[in-house]
Image: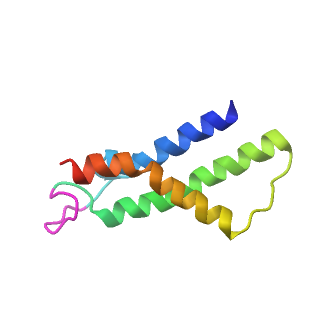
Amino acid sequence: MTNWILFGLVFFAANLPWSSNKLFYLIPVKQNLDSTLDSQGKNLGWCLFELIVLYFLVGAVALYAEYATLGQITHQDWEFYAVTSCLFLVFAFPGFVYKVLWK
């Protein structure tokens, strides 16, 4: 059950930056005439910044869930983090398509 909840949380968090024109749904971003996405929202750089921050936040939640269920945290090498960051980008693809390519 915990794995499915984490999977849903990761998919939700990966698509979160693409669904709002505000930074983290709180801070309005200064509108830019040369915006990469559209003239009324945040540009691609802000979305990628949000993705990185959300990746680390979801990773912290996953570490807590692992510690709460198993009682210890397993050591991971760089390969684990490379694969999970790429999967996070893959999960963000539907939001990217909706925000950038579809409009």
Q: Is residue 63 left or right of residue 24?
A: right
Q: Residue at x 75, y 63 (%)?
A: 76
Note whether residue 22 is visible.
yes
Look at the magenta stretch and give its main secondary structure.
loop
**Residue 65 x/y as whole percent:** 72, 43
All told, the count of numbered labels is: 0
Q: Is residue 71 left or right of residue 33?
A: right
Q: Residue at x 67, y 62 (%)?
A: 80
**Residue 12 x/y as whole percent:** 47, 41
Q: Is residue 94 magenta?
A: no
Note whether residue 24 is visible.
no
**Residue 44 x/y as whole percent:** 30, 63
Q: Please tell me whether residue 53 is drawn above or below residue 61 in the rendered image.
A: below
Quadrant including the N terminus: top right
Q: Residue at x 33, y 45 (%)?
A: 19
Magenta-colored span? 30-39
Q: Please tell me whether residue 34 is drawn above or below residue 9 in the rendered image.
A: below
Q: Please tell me whether residue 52 is drawn above or below residue 19 in the rendered image.
A: below
Q: Residue furthest right?
A: 71
**Residue 101 x/y as whole percent:** 23, 53
Q: Please name whichever residue, 66 or 25, is drawn nearer the observer in this view of the structure.
A: 66
Q: Please name whichever residue, 64 or 98, is drawn nearer the observer in this view of the structure.
A: 98
Q: Is residue 42 left or right of residue 8?
A: left
Q: Is residue 36 magenta?
A: yes
Q: Residue at x 46, y 56 (%)?
A: 89
